[in-house]
Amino acid sequence: MSDERSGSWHAFASNGEALFTASLPRGVKIGLLDRPTVAADGSLWAPVHKRHDYVRHLHFSASGELFGEESFRDSDLQLDAHGEGAWIFEYGTFEPRLQHLDAERTVTREVHRRPDGDWWRQLSAFHRSACGTRLVAIDNPGNGGSNAPSVLAVFDGEGNASKQIELPRRDYWQVSSSADWAVAWGHRGPVVLVHLASGAVHHFELGARGSAHWNFSPEGDELWAVDIRAMTLHRFALPSD
């Protein structure tokens, strides 16, 4: 959680226990911080977006000490299942793809196609589940006037294709996942909750449209929504399927 008044970043355990308060480096504004990913040792990677140029990833220890940072042009970063390498995706290029990097940041794998074998059209978001067993991505139709739906592409933690699920509506720009579920949302319209095994899609809305960030509890048994404007954490029980 980021605090605009103090210019600090606060980390909490899943039970609400305060872990640390970190001071941000000079020049980093609270509004530019995005959601972090957590390594197996408890250290955190927090992306900081700077316009459309590049993304800086700040690396904090489990106690809040700033280790350093890395930069990836036009890319987001999610740690892999082993916590040493990372997955990134290139959304600002003419050849969208998922890439896996080892601990030395050497590319070891690239995913150029969706699970159905088609090329990515407009790879817009991806997320690795906290348990490390799922990697999901949103592929939107793009700007070519296509009536094709947005799809949720599902991979295992190593990047092997599993399935893809058509989503109602179009233009989803964020996604989060657990081992069994994914949640996708955009700037407008309802949030969709997808059961990955059955493909069942549930629609719902939170009153704070456009100001909520969605994710799952670390145990994967609840859906969480952080309402930025109301500074409130909403917790939802998941459906049976």
Image (cartoon, rainbow, N blue to C red):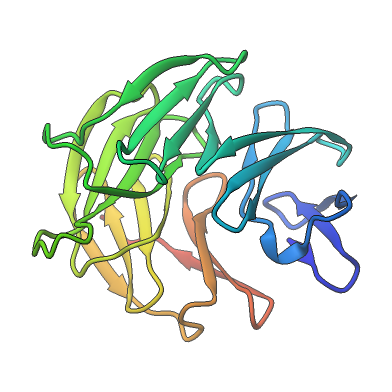
Specify the quadrant of the image occupied by residue 44.
top right
| Front residue of this view, candidates 35 and 235 | 35
Residue 163 position in % (x across, y down): 18, 37
The residue lying at 86 percent from left, 52 percent from top is 24
Total of numbered circles in the picture? Answer: 0
Residue 88 position in % (x across, y down): 48, 34
Residue 240 appearing in the image: no
Q: Is residue 97 left or right of residue 103?
A: left
Q: Which image quadrant: the C terminus?
A: bottom left
The residue lying at 44 percent from left, 64 percent from top is 237
Residue 168 position in % (x across, y down): 18, 67
Q: Is residue 234 above or below residue 55?
A: below
Q: Is residue 54 above or below residue 168?
A: above
Residue 138 appearing in the image: yes
Q: Is residue 82 above or below residue 9?
A: above
Q: Which image quadrant: the N terminus?
A: bottom right
Q: Is residue 232 above or below residue 220?
A: below
Q: Is residue 109 left or right of residue 214?
A: left
Q: Residue furthest bottom?
A: 207
Residue 94 position in % (x across, y down): 31, 41
